[in-house]
Amino acid sequence: MAGVRDGGIDDETLQELRSRATQLLLKEDWREYIAVCTRIVDGASGDCRVLCSALAHRADARARLGDAAGALADCDAALAADPAHPAALLSKGAILRGLGRYAPAADCFRAAALAAGGGGADEARELVEQCRRLEAQVRSGAVDLSEWVLAGFAGKCPDLAEYVGPVEVRRSARGGRGVFAVKNVEAGATLMMAKAVAIGRGVLQDTADGGEKMVVWKDFVDKVLDAAEKCPRTAALLHTLSTGEEQQDDLVIPEMALFRQEAGDLNLSDGNSEVREKGTQEVLDVDRILKVLDVNCLTEDAPAADVLGNNGVINCGVGLWILPSLINHSCHPNARRTHVRDHAIVHASRDIKAGEEITFPYFDVLVPLSKRREASSAWGFECKCDRCRFESEDFILKQEILKSENDLVNGADMGALVVRLEEKMRKSMVKEKCKAFLRASFWSAYSTLYDSDKLVRKWGRRVPGEALVAESIADVVGGSESVLRAMLRGSRDANGCGNRLEVEDKVVRIGRATYGKVVKRHAMRALFRFALDDNNNINL
């Protein structure tokens, strides 16, 4: 005869429920799995071992459905019954780690290591070390992907945490809101690391096929809506973003506490009642969220957004990163973003002063003014950065700019175009920064010239060296793979850029502007392979 437990559940029923739970686990039917675990919890209150195990399993399932609060409550209930229950400690640690609470997560894993034995203890100790590294990232923003890069992106991508550096959201002189530096930041330093709310990626057989892109987009939208339904904090963050229909001055300036997950706080603690009220409403405003996505999504195939480690597999990627999406565009940017799996790392591409607005390019800015205006119009704004104003308002160079744009479109001799533009700038005594603006705008002409031995032989003596032009452009648009390629190729023989050590320092500086400080110097060459053919490598 089956034994009856104190809570009213007998051994036979318990075995049936466990067998049912195993089936649901394999099917990943988490809601039914939770229901079965609940029956075990309700019927096994007199058996501490069974109770704690069922609570830990239910916590895992609730975490998978995005119910972090419910999952933690189950873990705490299990630990109240048995403070050293390994499964409950591991489950709570995993939930806290997923919430970015790395220090308390490490405490749970450390306790689990003491409670567990054999391989379980070793695994828990590894998790403690992982949390220690992530906690350091949260505090400093320091990332080292050197070994992963040197291994050719083989194996698992190193763990990344979310980090909010010395920045805050303020009213922008450009209109609306922007993200500003609150202290001086040196080039290459990380400004923020953000995990995507959701990402849509795919490999399109024919990139002209809009139908395939729509499949990626629909899948992405579904992921965003699912994330917002599961997490009130995510829903609240979504409501900080613009739909593109508001008056610029009406946009709410969100408290930075929304973006920083403070220790010990699993709810919204920013004090921004308006945002919190909108974000936690029971029924999501789907139409509003769709408008938010239209305005705020970032594409991973943008010139400033290489996906490290994709090995060429992805040719269509879109994602939503909340805080980075509040950064405004400029054709004279001071920041750049790089995508590493589902994280967007934003770093300073040149020195940024305290109080300066942070900007990065939404589109390719190594093109003439007319092309940039078309691109900004497609995004729904008109860029009025100092570079765009100079190119549209400078009376002396206006005709030369228009002529050069026409020559570029009509396929004229690119060497002649570059020589004429350089001579016009020299005669007009254009400032160095403005020279760099124009070189950036007509970079395709410069790169065509430098790529052609015939054009270099014909015009080379009348134009600046490739490395000098690349350095000039990097100073005003930040890093770029094509500019980095030119700097590396043009600096092989120093080419008037200084001695060997000076040249190498310049190369590393542009590399930092391009990728940020994500690798040590000894791993920089591996990153440079993105920009170089094997024949163009230099020794660093």
Image: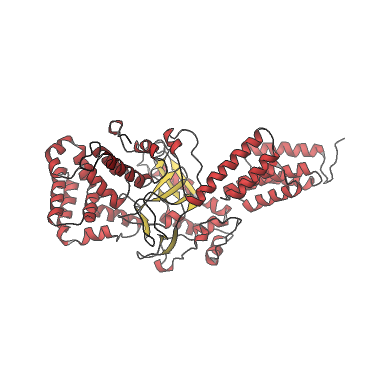
Residue nearest the viewer, comparing 177 with 472: 472
Nearest to the observer: residue 21 or residue 383: 383
Q: How is the image coloured?
A: secondary structure
Residue farthest to the bottom, as pictured: 249
| Visible residue check, residue 293 | no
- The answer to which quarter of the image holds residue 180 is bottom left
Q: Nearer the viewer, residue 14 or 426?
A: 426
Q: Quadrant of the N terminus?
A: top right
Residue 496 screen position, x and y as percent:
20, 42
Image vertical order of residue 218 relative to residue 251, above or below: above
Which x, y percent locates residue 143? 46, 45
Asked if one can make out residue 17 in the rendered structure from this viewpoint, the answer is yes
Q: Answer with left or right where residue 499 lies relative to residue 418.
A: right
In the figure, residue 215 lies in which quadrant?
top left
What residue appears at the point 53 percent right and 57 percent down from the top-left corner? 235
- Most foreground residue, 450 or 409: 450
Image quadrant containing the C terminus = top left
Residue visible at 43% across and 40% down in the picture: 202
- Residue drawn at 15 percent across, 54 percent down: 425
